[in-house]
Amino acid sequence: MKLERFVGAAVAAGVLVVGGIAGAAVTFDPDAGSGFVGKGDVQLALGWNNKTLQDNAASVQFRFGGEEITEVSWVCTNTNNENTQERARTTTNDTQGVVASVARERNQVTGFHLTGYSGSVTSSSTTEGPALNSCPSGPWTLTSPAGDPEVIGSSGGGLEVSADGADWHELG
């Protein structure tokens, strides 16, 4: 699974604890997609008061994802034996939904139990730079084709929450 490459780099201990605020109640195991998110963390991320959370708890959704940046290069040479190196950089974002159920105590929402991943990983990529193995116009020829992409940066461990599935907010 593509998401695993982000998870491994982000979490050495196996359990991610998200949140830099006092009393934060987010625990998350990225390998299993399980854990718990306290109501206060959701309220803080979404800007909700307690009544809004209680009224809209059923619409709360979670997802987990990461980002990887790769770079690839190749060499073009012209008739004067001059070299130019071309580069392309690709940023790939992978996310996967997390199944949640509402935790209640005395008819009040107290948080959300995360019970695993739903569906498959979704990916989106953007590339900056010239087309792969292309050379400037004129007397340039490709002399060293691009090799495998090299990872130059990655991040993982991003647990996010949304009330509408479109506007996502990072927890913690």
Image: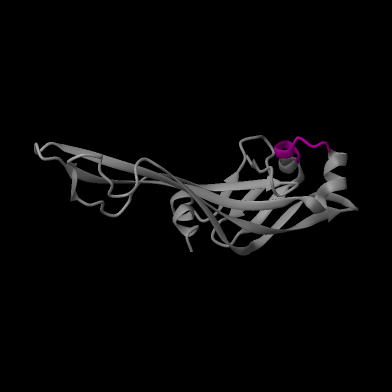
Q: How many marks?
A: 0
**Residue beneath the point at 69% across and 42% down:** 167
Quarter of the rendering occupied by the C terminus = top right
**Residue beneath the point at 37% across and 43% down:** 89
Residue numbers of the magenta segment: 43-49
Q: Position of residue 14 (x, y in %)?
A: 51, 56
Scheme of image coloration? one colour
Q: Is residue 160 left or right of residue 74?
A: right
**Residue beneath the point at 27% across and 41% down:** 86
Quarter where residue 24 is shown: top right
Q: Is residue 125 magenta?
A: no
Q: Is residue 91 left or right of residue 38?
A: left
**Residue beneath the point at 61% across and 36% down:** 20
Q: Position of residue 113 (x, y in %)?
A: 72, 57
Q: Residue furthest left?
A: 80
Q: Residue furthest right?
A: 107
In the image, 89 versus 26, the foreground residue is 89
Q: Position of residue 35 (x, y in %)?
A: 65, 56
Quarter where residue 99 is shown: bottom right
Q: Position of residue 39 (x, y in %)?
A: 76, 45
Quarter where residue 51 is shown: top right
